[in-house]
Amino acid sequence: MSFQEITPRELKPALLELDGISRTSVEAHYRLYRGYVAKRNEILGRLAGVDLAAANQVYSELRALKVDLTFAIGGIKNHELYFEHLGGAGGDPDGAFARLVARDFGSAEAWRADLKATGMAGRGWAWTAYDWDEGRLFNYIGDAQNTFPVWNATPLVALDVYEHAYSIDYQTDRGAYIDAFFANLDWGVVNGWIEAYRIPTA
Ligand SMILES: [Fe+2]
């Protein structure tokens, strides 16, 4: 099996000037993100030489590599979403995302309250995603980079609630960080994803 090595995306300058989320915090995410990219490349390289005949569910090199690959890839995808959709003016959603939120949650306030609560209840992430089978949005909970996404759903908002996301700026006050997260979302980016993925909004 061959694979392409990937390189970390650059941080856009606006991320270093967020409102209520410090440059130090963003740089902490970025250091971790670069680590996920490096480990993704390393694991895929190791998998190329793994002994398939030794595969075993209790312990095997194949099992260890494939389980931890999901953590590395999750860390990459989650952070690329996080970095890309921050740097905006926040406020209530507009455009296509506003229409989906109004239809599936009733109001922007109800969506925000549900995502914030999901973030308070999670140990790593909370995501708003569009489930293609259900045809609607849902706020999913995550305890780690690789738990608990579901198949055939497209994430549109990715809220990092790992301690490194808030402890530098807010100590243990995760709720205050989540409020700052909402205040920096860029709805143009989220609506661009809805258009790119052709998510139906009617
Ligand atoms: Fe992070």
Image: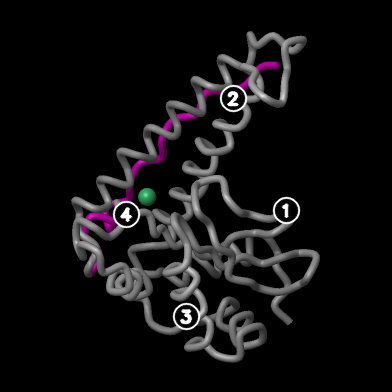
Picture coordinates of residue 67, whole percent (x, y): 60, 32
Picture coordinates of residue 82, whole percent (x, y): 43, 56
The quarter of the picture where residue 138 lies is bottom right
Q: What's the residue type where badge 2 is placed?
A: Ala
Q: Indicate yes or no whether the magenta region holds residue 127.
A: no
Q: CA distance from mark 4 to mark 1?
A: 27 Å
SS for dot 2 = helix
Residue carrying label 3: 112
Residue carrying label 4: 163
The earlier-in-sequence mark between 1 and 3 is 3
Q: What's the residue type where badge 1 is placed?
A: Trp
Q: Name the side, left or right, on which 64 lies relative to 7.
A: right
The earlier-in-sequence mark between 2 and 1 is 2
Q: Name the side, left or right, on which 29 lies relative to 92.
A: left
Question: Is 10 drawn above or below residue 83 in the view shown?
Answer: above
Residue carrying label 2: 64
Question: Is 148 drawn above or below residue 179 in the view shown?
Answer: above
Q: CA distance from mark 1 to mark 3?
A: 23 Å
**What range of the chain is rendered magenta?**
1-19
Q: CA distance from mark 2 to mark 1?
A: 22 Å
Residue carrying label 1: 151
